[in-house]
């Protein structure tokens, strides 16, 4: 498995627009792009080769809304870009790493993604990302 870089750090937010304003106005960082992915409203703030990914649930019963209700706003996950996500998942599964996703699925930025379960990663939700472009 080849890990190329930290792709992004996912931040759970109640209001993506207010959060964007902080990054733009206070930190003077531009928002590169915004996307909708199912119930999620996502804004990307590039910093070098990594993004801060602001993630808001548009559904009060959605996964991010439930996360915020339980733990509050803040870091949700760490995303690592891998060269071959299928190979990475197979290697990690063979090593006994618990997987949230047994197979890659569509993600933001036209990527394929899969999550590793925090119970096997010292409490950190790790997302594997393979970009298709």
Image (cartoon, rainbow, N blue to C red):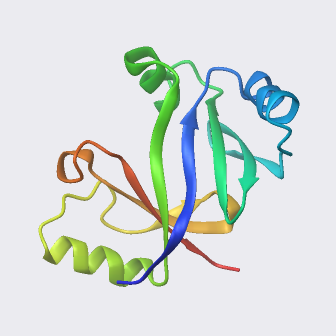
Query: Is 101 situated left or right of 77 in this image?
Result: left
* Viewer-proximal residue among 104 and 23: 23
In the figure, 56 relative to 69: above or below?
below
Query: Is 36 situated left or right of 14 in this image?
Result: right
**Quadrant in the picture for residue 86:** bottom left
- The residue shown at (82%, 28%) is 26
Can you give x and y, in whole percent of width and height, for residue 97 in the image?
18, 63
- In this figure, what is the number of numbered marks? 0
- The residue shown at (72%, 29%) is 16
The residue at the far front in this view is: 27
* Viewer-proximal residue among 133 and 126: 126
- The residue shown at (70%, 22%) is 15
* Viewer-proximal residue among 79 and 93: 79
Query: Is 46 situated left or right of 7 in this image?
Result: right
**Quadrant in the picture for residue 126:** bottom left
**Quadrant in the picture for residue 95:** bottom left
Can you give x and y, in whole percent of width and height, for residue 20 in the image?
79, 32
Quadrant the N terminus occupies? bottom left
Can you give x and y, in whole percent of width and height, for residue 33 in the image?
83, 51
In the figure, 15 relative to 132: above or below?
above
- The residue shown at (15%, 77%) is 94
Quadrant the C terminus occupies? bottom right
* Viewer-proximal residue among 62 and 78: 78
Can you give x and y, in whole percent of width and height, for residue 21 in the image?
83, 27
């Amino acid at each position: 498995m080849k890990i190329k870089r930290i792709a992004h750090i996912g931040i759970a937010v109640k209001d993506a627009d207010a959060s964007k304003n902080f990054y733009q106005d206070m930190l003077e960082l531009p928002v590169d792009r915004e996307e909708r992915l199912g119930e999620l409203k996502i804004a990307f703030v590039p910093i070098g080769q990594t993004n801060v990914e602001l993630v808001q649930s548009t559904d009060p019963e959605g996964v991010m809304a439930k996360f915020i209700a339980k733990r509050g706003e803040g870091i949700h996950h760490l995303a690592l870009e891998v060269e071959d996500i299928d190979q990475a998942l197979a290697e990690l599964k063979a090593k006994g790493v618990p997987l949230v996703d047994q197979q890659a699925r569509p993600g933001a930025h036209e990527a394929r993604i899969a999550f590793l379960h925090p119970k096997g990663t010292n409490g950190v939700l790790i997302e594997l990302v393979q970009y298709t472009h």
